[in-house]
Image: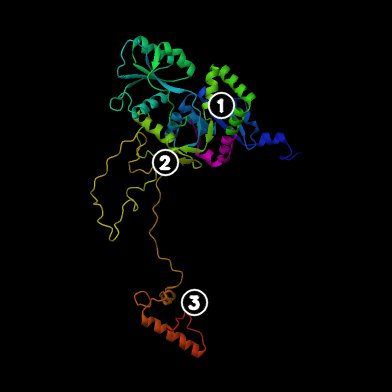
Amino acid sequence: MKCLNCDNSALETYRPRFRVGTTTTFADEPVSGALKQKLYKNLESCAVDWVICPDDGSAIMAMLNVGIIDMVMARIEDAVMLTRWSKSLRVCGMFDCSPHLWRLLVPRKGRAQPIKPLKIKTLGVPEHLAGSMMTCLLQDWDLFGWLDDPPEIVVMRSLVEGLREMNTRSSVQALLWECSDSESSTIQNVCTEVMEPFLAPWKSHAFVCTRETVFAKSSAIRQFFDFTNNLVQDMRANEVDRVKLEAYIMNTYGVSRADVRRWIEESPMHCTADVDYITVSRPLQYLRRLQVIPTEKDPSPTLRLASCVRLLGAPVARPPPNSGRAAARALPGAGPSAPSSAKKAPPRPDAGCDFTNDICETDEGPRSTLSSSQEVRLMPSSVAKGVLVLPARGDCSGACGPPAAQVSAVAERTASSRQAGAQAPALEGPSPRPVPAG
């Protein structure tokens, strides 16, 4: 019989399980590939298991609430919807890995035609919500007059279908698609790009788990993030591991070698428990604009963050409108206070989140109001009244010191007690300090 410290097989058996769910798409690489190849077996704190998740948000939410998986890595738009559908789900971390750039494509025309201002009324986007969210981003940038006249969004199942609808049937005037460099070079004969490729200003993925998982396995979550970052650093530093990853991506997803190398070199591939404010607020704002998520009374994104997460870049917390701190009290001599019937300042236009409302952006819920300050007495009232506050040296005015009658009474009582050779009358506490004459 061996103890757990001596038996290596026992350590592999009795380690707590930590089940991580991902999809089998290229968007979840390299975490899904590391889980598939069981590269987390050297993690000594827990035994990491891979759970393949379907492309269905309702199924993933049920798997999290039931306990089939402990944590799932989802795209940021899916993570926001998961946390809004279920009150028990929390965002516990971020992962940034954007494999492709977004491109705005229009049909290619003859070179002899003059360049005219584009008036795009119909826009084709992919099936997932990321395309519609990027359309909202371009609308905030006020491109092609979309701020006043937004285009009609038409969902396409694939890039081939979108090109056919744009060039043959003319059902859409432009395409907003996430294309790789090889795909962009292939479709240059039928379409052209009207703006520079761009990336989303937020992180690509978020880790979602339940509140029970945050409470029970917060240490396993942090160690999973650290181990993933170490795997990525070793892969980039070791040429052999890098070649293996390139071969695995090309054979599994059919991506060209140039796209794989660009993805490895330019993608951050970093797990962190620090959450950017724009990552959890801007997608939520766009999903509300698209009417995918109903508008709530409290749009604060921190209601869906785990307790172990640190929010970065958030605006300064504002007190509730009805609290005592929100109403400024006029000080004497500070000038007249603002009238109570003053109108509220109009909100300033902002491409990001609306910071002008009265809702505290970093408040995690209602808090109990503290009671007013109370008087605390360290001594009984009789003794407290007998303690004298002497004036400062050089200031013997009666305004800052005790009354002269009270000082003389205490001095006479102290002198009589010394002459009698007895102690002073017993009080409920220490005797008052004698006041020296003069």
Q: Which residues are magenta?
A: 205-227
**C-alpha gap between disc 2 and disc 1:** 30 Å
- In the picture, the quarter occupied by the N terminus is top right
As drawn, the label of residue 304 is: none
| Residue 194 part of the magenta segment | no
Quick check: 103 above or below 274? above
SS category of the residue bearing label 1:
loop
Examine the residues drawn in magenta and state their main secondary structure: helix
Q: Residue furthest bottom?
A: 420
Which is more toward the observer, 201 or 237?
237
State left or right for residue 64 relative to residue 357.
right
**C-alpha gap between disc 2 and disc 3:** 54 Å
**C-alpha gap between disc 1 and disc 3:** 74 Å
Counting residues from the N terminus, which is met first, the one under dot 1 or under dot 3? 1
Residue that label 1 marks: 30
- In the picture, the quarter occupied by the C terminus is bottom left
State left or right for residue 428 relative to residue 235.
left
Residue that label 3 marks: 430
Specify the amino acid type for callout 2. Ala
| Residue 214 part of the magenta segment | yes
Quick check: 33 above or below 90? above
**In the image, residue 181 lies at what x, y percent?**
48, 18
Residue that label 2 marks: 314
SS category of the residue bearing label 3:
loop
Quick check: 350 above or below 328? above
Categorize mark 3 by other alpha carbons within 10 Å: few (<14), some (14-19), many (20+): few
Categorize mark 1 by other alpha carbons within 10 Å: few (<14), some (14-19), many (20+): some
